Structures are given as C-alpha cells and as structure tokens.
Image (cartoon, helix red, strand yellow):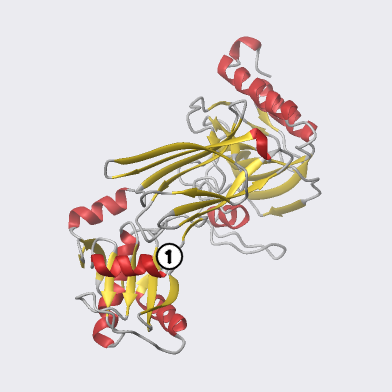
Amino acid sequence: MKSNNTIDESDIQILDEINNLITKNKGIYKSALVITALAKQQNSWKNVFTKITLSNEDGDFSEKLEYDNFILNKISITVDDFLKLLDDLVKEGELKIKNSPNVKATGNFNTDSYWRYRSSNDKQINNEWPTNHYIFNMDNVGRGNASGDPLVSARYAHFPNAESAIKYYNEFDLGYNSGSIFLFLPNYQLKIDEVLIGSEHLDLKLNINDIKQEELIGKIYCEKEGLIKTEDFYIDENPKRIHLSFIPDFMSIYVLKNDDEILDFRRIYLSWPSSPYKDVIIDLKENDILTMIKQGENQHIEFKQELDNKHKEEFIESVVAFANGKGGAILIGVDDKSNVIGFNQDKIEEHIINIIRSQCDPFIESELQSVKIDDKPIIVVRINEGTNKPYTLRNRGVYVRSGSTDRIASRIELDEFYKK
C-alpha cells in the first residue's frame, strides 16, 4: 500500500475528476467493459495493455483467453467495481481485475489535459462517442511487453503474437503505449454522426440523447486562402444545414450547451473533392463536377479519357499518388484538354477494384460515382488520403503527386513517410 506522502497530488486530482464525472453521469453509466492483456515475465504478471470504458448499457460479458505466458481478459464490471479498481490502482499501487492475476501497478496519470476530451470517431482512440480519456503510465515494475512468440492453444484462437491478439479484440494499435492503462468515460449526451459537405452548404447530422435542442448552440469556423467565415448557429433542425460561401480547406465545428459544456466537435482538413474522414461525406453535384472539369487537372484532379492498357497504367499511378498525398479524384471519360468524351463500361466498379487490388500495396479504398455531363456518362473515382502510407505500385515503386502529374517519390520523400 502506498503511504499518503507517496501518492502524487496530481493523481489524486485526476481521481477526484473521474469520480465527479461519474457522479454527474449517475444513471447514465451502467457498467464498465474491461479489456486487459497480461504477460508473465520473470515469474510475475505484468500489464501489457488495459482499457476500461464506461458504458450506458448493462454489461454481462466475460471472455478469457489464457495461454502459457499471456492472458487476454475481456469482462464487464459494475460502476462501483470500476471505482474500487481505480482506488486500488492509485492508492494501493495494484491493478486488480476480476478473473485476472493481480499486478503491481505503480506509476502516474498523464497530466497533459489538452487532448483529454476527444471528439467522437477520433482516429487515435477509435471511440464512437465524445470521450474523456485518461492514461495511467506504468513504471518498469508492472510494465509488460507484448511477446513476439506465437499464441497457440487447443482451446483458444491462434494469433502470430500478443500484439495481434490485442488488436483483434480491441482494434487498438499498441504503438508506444505498451504497459499503459486507458480509461474512457464517454459523453453519451450527443455526438456528431455525419458531416455532409457540398460546394454551397454543409449538413450536420447529430445523434442526440436526453437533451433539448434549445439547450444547444453550434459554432463554425471556415478558412480558405485568406477567406474566413465564423458564425454561430442553433440546432433548429436535424440534420442542420449551414450555408457556405466558399469550399473551405479547413473547418472547425463545435456543438455545446448553453452553459458552455462542449459536447462534440470536428476539425476537418479538406482536399476537395476527397475526404480523409469516414464520417465526412463530400456531396458532389453535376455543377461541381463541371467546375472541376473547367478548372482542369491540378494537385487533386486527374482526367483519363478511358481505361485501355495505356491509360490503366496512368490511372493506377494517380490512385497511388493521391493515397500518398492528400487525396484526389480521377474523372474517367474526360481528356487532358477538359473535353468530355464519355465513358461507359459494364461492371466498372468491379473492374477498378480489381485493378487496385492487383497492383497496389497496401490496398487503397476508392469511391465511385457515375454522372452524366452533356448526356455523356463519366465516372468519378475518389481516392481519400491514405492512413497506411507509403502506398506502392507493385514492381514500380512509391508514387506521389506533383502539380498535375504523378512521379516516383524521392529518397527524401520516402524518408519522411517512414518517419511518421
């Protein structure tokens, strides 16, 4: 047991903060889901990874995978049990999880509060709802490492290593977080479900629980090459339509209560007409595509007259280059001089997916849209910025976009990819 003078004051402050949040959400939080991975090293169990999420649903889940020197335990506990677990962690220096060995868990909470409140659908933590999140960093006494040995058992699923098992059950990439304990306290009042962006408007779709729309206020900031728009809006409809005077390169959207409590937000960097976010949808209309054609090829737009062998090679170069950059769109059925030629081919979506799958590594997602311009069909293939760079064209190399052309990445550019 830690003595009072060995407990860090900042840990007590964070413990009080968590208790206050749970008191505030009394009746909303009904259980907690624990996912813990433990490794046996030097005859003692150590924490490789633990994540605890407060839930607004009753929990009755229990699953345990137990290998020779590795345990993965996924179990629901009560809110009271969560508070007791947290108290033991901070004051006793022990991690005590039901159906798991006790672990010496000395360490401290991360005190950086800047990113403590995360928006919904945050890429880093894969959360559905906006979330207060806390990280308890273990010291070397209780910190475990994910073994690279295969996990093989007659009773349980096979994984090539412990990190693969953790990622499979939790969709979480350990990265530099091995040995940490993550606490997620979602805000179930409201979340932004979708942002649909057109050339003249934005539709904000919200998921609202137990809160009146008249209690809400929205804030939006848009910026593009010196143009700035900032305004407040009220949630008098859902989805809420907000008119835009220009297509922004960056926008910041916040939804909060009248008492200044932030509920959810988005910071969106756009490379029109592609979006790097799954819940940010680009709404391309015929007029938008006509404008793109008139403007000609650029950093984010490429034209292809057809998909014969010659154009197919150029097409896949652009796919890889856009994924390695900020994304872009390829218009099939438009020539290099912005003339609409038209393009029509059976099973085009299947054909394009097969081209990408056979030549790109890793696989690159695409979105297809068929439209008619002057009664001539064209295909718009949108490629979002990739999340697993660098992308490679098999047997050719890594391509990047430079103005309106694609080229092989330089050594310096490759170094930058691998640093990230």
Q: Write down the residue under mark 1.
A: 284
Residue located 61% across and 9% down the image: 5
At which x and y percent is residue 128?
61, 48
274 or 137: nearer the viewer: 274
State whether residue 29 is above or below residue 150: above
Residue type at mark 1?
A: Leu
In the rendered structure, the answer to whether residue 96 lies left or right of residue 269 reads right
The quarter of the displayed image where residue 42 is located: top right
At which x and y percent is residue 263?
60, 36
At which x and y percent is residue 367?
45, 70
149 or 23: nearer the viewer: 23
385 or 16: nearer the viewer: 385
Residue located 39% across and 77% down the image: 379
In the rendered structure, the answer to whether residue 115 lies left or right of residue 336 reads right
Mark 1 secondary-structure assignment: loop
Residue located 63% across and 55% down the image: 169
Residue located 49% across and 46% down the image: 124
In the rendered structure, the answer to whether residue 202 lies left or right of residue 48 reads left
Extreme residue toward the top, this view = 5
